Amino acid sequence: MRCSVALAALAALASSALARVYYEETFSAPDSIDSFKATKARDDVGAIKLSRGEWYGNENGSGLQIAEDARFYAYSAKLKRPFNTKGKDFVVQFTVKYEQDIDCGGAYLKLLPPTLDPTKFDGDSEYEVMFGPDICGSTNRRVHAIINYNGTNQQIDKVIQPRGDQLTHQYTFWVKPDKTFEIRIDNKVQEEGKVEDFWKVLPEKQIPDPDAEKPEDWVDGPVMINDTEDVKPEDWVDGPATIPDPDATRPEDWDDDMDGDWEAPVIANPEFKGEWKARQIKNPAYQGEWTAPMIDNPAYEEDEDLAVFNIGYVGIDIWTVKSGTIFNNILITDDIDYASKFGNSTWADFVESEIAAKKVVDDIESKKLEEERKAKEAAAKEAEEKEKAEAKEADVDADIEADADVEPASKAAAADDVFDELDEDDEDKVAAERAAAAEKLAAEEAAAAAEETAAAEKLAAEEAAAAAEKKAAAEKLAAVKAAKAKAAKAKTDKAKADKKASKKKAAKEAARKAKQAAEEAAKKAAEAEKAAVEDEDEDTVAHDEL
């Protein structure tokens, strides 16, 4: 039992030792993005940059971000060493974050042959595998899984839905030496099976027998027939559908010469039941649609090179409407266990903290939008009130202009001049005009004061909005710092827990070794004691013989 366990452990260690990583990039180094070279095949290639995004869970989680809207991107990076996957596991894994709330754009990788010329890389370049999400609108969404077989690119015969939110998600494509595969999103299997069942590149294993003929007595229809035992009832009325109304009478004033021959109006025949048809029953002779029997396809032949890839470069060849997509944690290896551990340490451990950081940003944005909405409502109300005041003022001016043909430069002085020039009989009229002029002056002064007050209120509102925006920015910064601190604490706590577990494991291993040493020592002591007894017995026999 112990021997088998030891052999299993040695096999696991040997497997781990044989595993190789052909490409691994977390973009943690400032110059890591330089490994991706832009093509020279076109001049309108969009720019890329290192970025963690507006929200993130991993403080050191920078990635390759698409930096320009409505552009093509064609970048490639060379693997550490070429990877021929024959007889090996093949794993490609990476993370994607559609931070811009994607409407139309791809986020897939192309794995390219060692013969690629990076300066000529474009959409027509030959590739071995294309894998990753592609979204355009609400209906055109899928995870591409395209393999090249004998120079032809073949898409997986299954639509796998990608993740379209604004969080980071991990995509994994694993092809095994036995020609089976798994596609995972966020460590959950989305599809699995035999490669030849999902990529129709080989002839069918079985085909209809081309020499088979349909038997002459084969009945393939109809499915239903009339029941020969069903008989039409004697009282069945199948016509006519309409009859003259028996209750109708000829009008007294009807004139045959003028109105023609009188006929009773037609009504539906109350006894009419329609055309009689026999009841339908299943045809007892029906055998169904005839199909030729299946036979082995002589053209089918298993191909050991199916899903065998020869890879030398990893490339990004996409077009996107809005920039912001972030690629990260790109891994190409022949060890799925290593890929799982790598994914946990670079993505899974930071999922919760990223969700928390995103919530903080969403809350701040919601608060800002609400404040902007209130400010717009206040401004609209103020504008409406100002418009009403101006309309009222215009009405007053019109009334005054209607009463006076000429408006003097000074309203109060003009009233006095008019009063002096008129006779005593017109004093009442002049007084009224003077009062109107005074009212107009007061209205203008009131309007000016209201306008001044509105301007002051508008300035105060703008200052308040600026202060609110500054406060929101400060709250956002504080929230991001808090999220960072939380993530750092989680990372520290995990490190402590790992260290504690490691110590516990080491202590347990030391105890096991001590126990093993004690057992070996006891065994040796027992063997020595047995040997001593055997020597004593031999001495006794020799003495007796003597």
Image: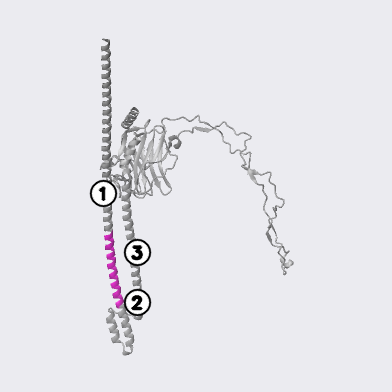
Q: Residue at x 35, y 81 (%)?
A: 403
524 inside magenta stretch = no
**Residue 50, percent from left and from top:** 28, 45
Mark 3 or mark 1, earlier in chain: 3
Residue on which the image places disc 2: 396
Q: Which residue is mark 1?
A: 485
Task: Name which residue lies at 26% across and 44% down.
Answer: 492
Q: Give the crowd class for mark 2: few <14, some 14-19, many >=20 residues within 10 Å.
A: some
Q: Amino acid at mark 1?
A: Ala
Magenta stretch in the rendered image: 441-468
| Amino acid carrying mark 3 in the image | Glu
Query: Which numbered disc, 1 or 2, marks the residue that appears first in the sequence?
Result: 2
Residue projecting furthest to the top: 546
Q: Quadrant of residue 333?
A: top left
Instruction: Name the image quarter holding the N terminus.
Output: top left
Instruction: Name the side, left or right, on which 230 lies relative to 433.
Output: right
Q: Nearer the viewer, residue 231 or 432?
A: 231
Magenta segment: does it hold 464? yes
Q: Quadrant of residue 80?
A: top left
Q: Is residue 134 above or below residue 266?
A: above
In the rendered image, the quadrant that contains the C terminus is top left
Q: Which is more N-terminal, label 3 or label 2?
A: 3
- The answer to the question of whether label 1 and label 2 lie on touching residues, with beta carbons closer than 8 A, is no
Q: Position of residue 139 (x, y in %)?
A: 43, 48
How far is mark 3 from mark 1, CA to CA? Answer: 38 Å
Label 3 environment density (alpha carbons within 10 Å; few <14, some 14–19, many ≥20): few
Residue that badge 3 annotates: 377
Vertical side of 393 occupied by 35: above or below: above
Q: Nearer the viewer, residue 23 or 76?
A: 23
